[in-house]
Amino acid sequence: MQGSNETGMKPGYRALLAEIALMARETAPLTGLAEFSPQVMAAMGRVPRHLFVPAGQEAFACGNHPLSIGYGQTISQPYIVALMTELLRLDKTSRVLEIGSGCGYQTAVLAELAGQVYSIEIVEPLGRSAAARLMELGYRNAVVQVGDGNQGWPEHAPYDAMIVTAATPRIPPPLLDQLRPGGRLVIPVGRPFQTQELVLVQKDEDSGRIHESSILPVSFVPLTGGQLA
């Protein structure tokens, strides 16, 4: 079951959506997206970001910026969450793999739009708390597993869409293998403290060939685990 914000959208979230829409227009020369779909914007408004941030940071949850969630990890900037989600082109039939559950915020946004979301988090306390929070909020179509996301989650492959929420020097081959023909993968590529690019990967429906497109510069924490250097 999707859906979480039972009390309706708070005023701060309306302002946040307006700022996301403004940033979409400003970055359109890079992304090719002057606006995000009504479905993505509605999902951003429904997911209560203040319930995903650490205690004491709730007042900052409606800001369009990342926040620390401990363990060297962050909850992503809402504009980036919306952009990455938009690039996946999800619908209710989509099976999605997320690498890097973090606090579960991006997972919840995906679950608002997709049929099934499988998410992997390498930091055990974060993964367990994200799973519990998503369950409490009613996201029955989101499953979180603690583990190394570099290997994907082959038991549920192939996936219609994949999203990676940490930067890696190169795309892990298992992810490409588990992406179905016609599928889309969004991933930040680059090294820590250096220039990173948000990359859209598309697997050709007929040939299975991989096509990569750079979307815009980004800054993400590094993907940990068994990735190749």
Image (tube, grey):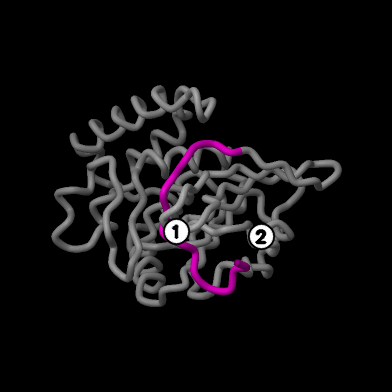
Q: Is residue 123 magenta?
A: no
* Residue drawn 71% across the image and 60% down it: 178
* Residue occupying image coordinates x 50% and y 57%: 191
x and y, in percent, of residue 138 in the image: 38, 58
Q: Residue furthest toward the right?
A: 207
What type is the residue that disc 1 sits on?
Answer: Pro
Residue that badge 1 annotates: 192
Q: Is residue 90 visible?
A: no
| Image coordinates for residue 45, horizontal then vertical, percent | 33, 38
Residue at 46% over, 68% down: 121
Quarter holding the C terminus is bottom right
Crowding at dot 1, Cα within 10 Å, few <14 / some 14-19 / many 20+, comes out as some
**Residue under label 2:** 175
Upstream in sequence: badge 1 or badge 2: 2
Prevailing SS of the magenta stretch: loop
Closer to the camera in the image, 131 or 224? 224
Q: Nearer the viewer, mark 1 or mark 2?
A: 1
Is 165 rendered above or below residue 224? above
Instruction: Say which residue appears at 85% left-offset and 41% top-offset.
Output: 206
Few, some or many C-alpha atoms within 10 Å of disc 2 (few <14, some 14-19, many ≥20)? many
- Magenta residues span 214-229
Q: Which quarter of the image is occupied by the N terminus?
A: bottom left
**Quarter of the view holding residue 38:** top left
The front one of 28 and 180 is 28
**Amino acid found under the numbered disc labelled 2:** Leu
66 to 124, vertically: above or below: above
Please name whichever residue, 176 or 88, is drawn nearer the observer in this view of the structure: 176
Q: Secondary structure at mark 1?
A: loop
